[in-house]
Amino acid sequence: MENKENENKYGEIKLVHRMTVIKRIIHWVFFLAIINNIITGFYIAYPFLFFGKTPAQADSLSSGILSSGETYQAFIMTWMRYFHFMGAVLIDVIFIVWLYLAFFSWKEPLYKSFIPFGDKMVEAWKMIKHYFTLKNKPETGRYQDSLNAIIFTIFHLLILLQMLTGLQMYVASFTGTSAVGAWWPWLMHFSTDWTLVVFGGLTGVTLVHLFIMWLIIIFIAYHIYIEVWRSIMWKEGDILIPFGGYKYLRNKSETE
Amino acid sequence: MDNGNDNRSKENKPGFKWDPLRFIAKNPDETLKKVDGRLDKLEKECFGDKKDKNSNLKNIFDVYGVTRRDFLKWTAFLTSALMLPYVFKPRVARAANILTRTPFIWLDMADCMGNTEAFIRTAHPTPAEIILNYVSVNYMESIMAPAGYQAETRRTETVKKYKGKYILVVEGAIPTGMNGKFLTIGAKGGTGLEIAKETAKNAGVIIAVGNCASYGGIPAAEPNPTSAVGLSSVTNRRVINIPACPANPVNVVGTLVEYILIGKAPQIDGLGRPLWAYSGRLHDNCYRRGHFEAGEYVRHWGDDGAKKQYCLYMMGCKGPFTWNNCTTAEYNQDISFPMRAGHGCIGCSQPAFWDRMTPFEKPNADAKIIIPGIEATVDEFGVGLLGVAGAGIAAHAIYTGVKKNKNKENRKDKEKKESKKTAPKNGSDDSK
Ligand code: HEM
Ligand code: HEM
Ligand code: SF4
């Protein structure tokens, strides 16, 4: 009896698989790497922790605590750059895996939902309308909804730009060869030298890198908000996707 | 200098592969033989007899009280600056000797003549500056004796007589607006554009000295009223750029010496600069780099960090964006460079440094971005956008709450009405 009542109120509940284990791992490694790169990147752009025990610096709270005396004992910038580059390696690998999965994943290739043509745009527009009218919730399907897919694609393009500008800054300290051979700096020059022309020299590239960071922060804010919003409004457990891989599907929506 | 005109050979395309032997030959012995053969030939051309050859540099240096020992030390310095093996040291000396007899034209275009000043006004000139003073200058407005029509004739005759052999050094940007009329030079009032093109056509080797000649420099800074450009934009000949403000005499003489040694343009980078001088980033060779890594920064001019020579990153040092050999070749009689003097680099050997490296005394992250109608740093702009996005999110959250309640009430109303009609209806009408 009780079950039936629930079914009436919430509709029929089914499980939908959305994220494979690999995708879930990618999601959280991505999360950690990006948070890490935002913190360390900020530091590189504008070193806010000061080391060294000069009288001028010791009266600041942070430097007073973190001062470590001799120069050779405090390699704070080294560590920041080191972690930034480790995060960058993760981001680069994840991007390439994402690119592969987007086209060749045999479970849920992303390109089925992200190519923004035809009815994909219509579907995305319906979702936006739903965000503002709270009516006519688009049906939950087997794949990501178009709006999310498009936004995730844009996000990955930002990451790509971040990689290219980052590698251009990185290759700046190479002088033509490297420990793994000359092909590595050559590859970076080959793939990223255009950024110098487009963004106006290395200073411009750095500023673009910095600016994209802000766009990524905005994406994160939007992304978390909208996933929480969906979980509350749709009652389909969207927030569980990156944890368990599943969300629920109901054939009845409360808001209708 | 005979094959000077085909110095755009394939091996010299801008590239990242560096050969200390300049791709002259695969075998080092053969390389030396070729270089020696070249020097022998040039010496025969330039000097009357053996005595002339041997006393030439001595006569010049005696005037300045530079001893033979000083000169030898300098050749060792230049050889290593050129990234040449040590065996080249005597050959560098011979090339310097030949250099003083090579026909030479120095053109001044739109700039402050700071490069000329830097070379001829030093109190204790090094051999580099002395050699630059004593090259057989056929035309150089600031130091030549002839004037007016005489001077013009001197230039055109040099071009004719030493076709394909003379060294052309150009200093200053070339205004191209109004057909170049922003800059007219000499008794006949030819435009700088014409003169530069004409003279470049038949030069053996062309060197653009200083940022203005290389990339337009300060005359080309926004909004560039005279449409000034660097030399390489007005000639299709290969131009070797020696940017910086002013260019380091070591780099100018080094490039000339290298040209005499190997007879072709040096290997250059993507911006037309000789790799031996411009392949290293200042930030990577700076003696303050340890403090950069340690997070020890100068925060105000004259603070304790400044006294301890901490890193100038936060005072706007542009060393991380600049390629040059200031930190190793050094300026002012080879004794100092900006960071040693306690001021950050201003990036003067990069294109458009007046626009891209400013503000000079603030970190790059504090630069104003160039979006029409917006004057903010990237961070201000980013925070602004984030604020707008945050406000949007908050507004949407509140809106959702309100709307949800309203919808609920509506639905209750509807349900009441519908229950009266007793015709159950599905709420969905997403046919649109
Ligand atoms: C740096 C932070 C984050 C980034 C860059 C990020 C990025 C992404 C990306 C790219 C996807 C799409 C995955 C795909 O299918 O390829 C995704 C999905 C998802 N993320 Fe995140 N994420 C972040 C943080 C979070 C957090 C903190 C949560 C909430 C706990 C979250 C919840 C979700 C959910 C629920 C999905 C699935 C959406 C769907 O399939 O419809 N994310 N995220
Ligand atoms: C979400 C990802 C990333 C964020 C938020 C981020 C952020 C930043 C920021 C804010 C800076 C400081 C820029 C400045 O000096 O004004 C920076 C520097 C840098 N980033 Fe990233 N970055 C990210 C990814 C990457 C990637 C993928 C690479 C690839 C190699 C990379 C390489 C670099 C390099 C080389 C620097 C310069 C370090 C230095 O000058 O010592 N970054 N990053
Ligand atoms: S002073 Fe300038 S070039 Fe030297 S380490 Fe600091 S930022 Fe780099």
Image (cartoon, rainbow, N blue to C red):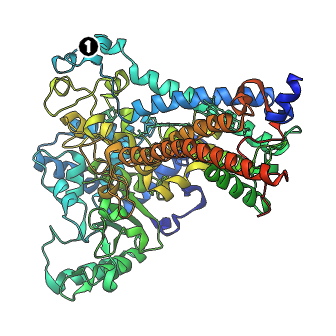
Q: Is residue B226 visible?
A: yes
The image quadrant that residue A76 belongs to is top left
x%, y% of residue B299? Answer: 22, 31
x%, y% of residue B326? Answer: 30, 41
The image quadrant that residue B192 belongs to is bottom left
* Residue placed most toward the observer, B170 or B321: B321
| Residue located 17% across and 39% down the image | B67
Q: Amino acid at mark 1?
A: Gly
**Residue located beneath label 1 in the image:** A64
| Label 1: element kind | helix
* Residue placed most toward the observer, B401 or A50: B401
x%, y% of residue B304? Answer: 16, 23
Q: Is residue B248 above or below residue B187?
A: above
Side (left or right) of B107 relative to A122:
left
Q: Is residue A167 visible?
A: no
> If the image is split into quadrants, where does the N terminus of chain A sit?
top right
Side (left or right) of A18 relative to A28:
right
Which chain's residue wears label 1? A
| Residue located 57% across and 49% down the image | A192
- Please rate how many residues cluster around mark 1, counting C-alpha atoms within 10 Å: few if below 14, some from 14 to 19, many from 20: some
| Residue located 47% across and 55% down the image | A199
